[in-house]
Image (tube, rainbow, N blue to C red):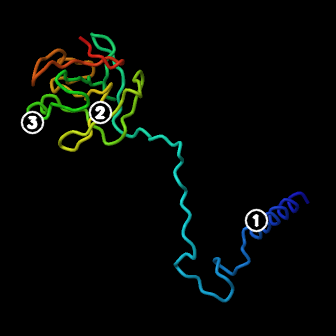
Amino acid sequence: MHSKLVLLGGLAAVAFIVAACGTGTGSYGAAPGTTPTSQPSTAPVVAAPSATASPRATGTAIAVGNSRLGPILVDSSGRSLYVFVADSGTASTCNSASCVQNWPPFLTTGAPQALNGVNPSLLGTTTRGDGATEVTYAGHPLYYFIADKKPGDITGQNIDAFGGPWYVVSPSGMQVR
């Protein structure tokens, strides 16, 4: 008896849902006696983006790692990041082929991601002369050093090359000397 009530209740619920969803039209939403068309009769409704939505960080990640000089900025693999004293604001002056070969820019294809210990308000980007997007921190472009091979390497620290010295960066955005 109980199973018959459950079955009847389920059938009644399905009938109610079908009746509530129906529009009084024939099959497939077409009015009786008409043929459905592939063209919608009204424009599709598209949800507008929220005015409070913030951009989602989808680009290169930056974190804080440990080095013999203390905490420094690193990429998501632990490779050390550097600033070039000769840069002016967010504009990179490391643009020659030999400079870029030795000090590759820290590039991104989306908004950079702030990982552990990184102040997201100090993260930014700048457009390089070749159109690539370089990550900045505290308003300074960031770079790798070609001789750093493993996490924690800081072999580029205090090297004077291409017009000025290079330094690793503290989480506060200051050069580590």
What residue is disc 3 on?
Answer: 97
Mark 3 packing: few (<14 Cα in 10 Å), some, or many (20+)? few
Determine the secondary structure under disc 2: strand
Image height of 26 relative to 12, above or below: below
Residue under the point 15% across and 18% down: 165
Closer to the camera in the image, 49 or 152: 49
Residue 144 location (% of width, % of height): 21, 27
Q: Earlier in the sequence, mark 1 or mark 3?
A: 1
Label 1 sits on a secondary structure element that is helix
Mark 2 nearby-residue class (10 Å; few <14, some 14–19, many ≥20): many
Q: Amino acid at mark 2?
A: Val
Residue at which label 2 appears: 135
Q: Amino acid at mark 3?
A: Ala
Is residue 101 depicted above or below 153 in this figure?
below
Q: Is residue 24 left or right of residue 160?
A: right
N-terminal-most mark, 1 or 2:
1
Q: Residue furthest bottom?
A: 33
Q: Disc 1 designates what residue?
A: 17
Left or right side of 141 for 164: left
Point out the frontmost of discs 1 and 3.
3
In which quadrant of the rendered image does the N terminus lie? bottom right
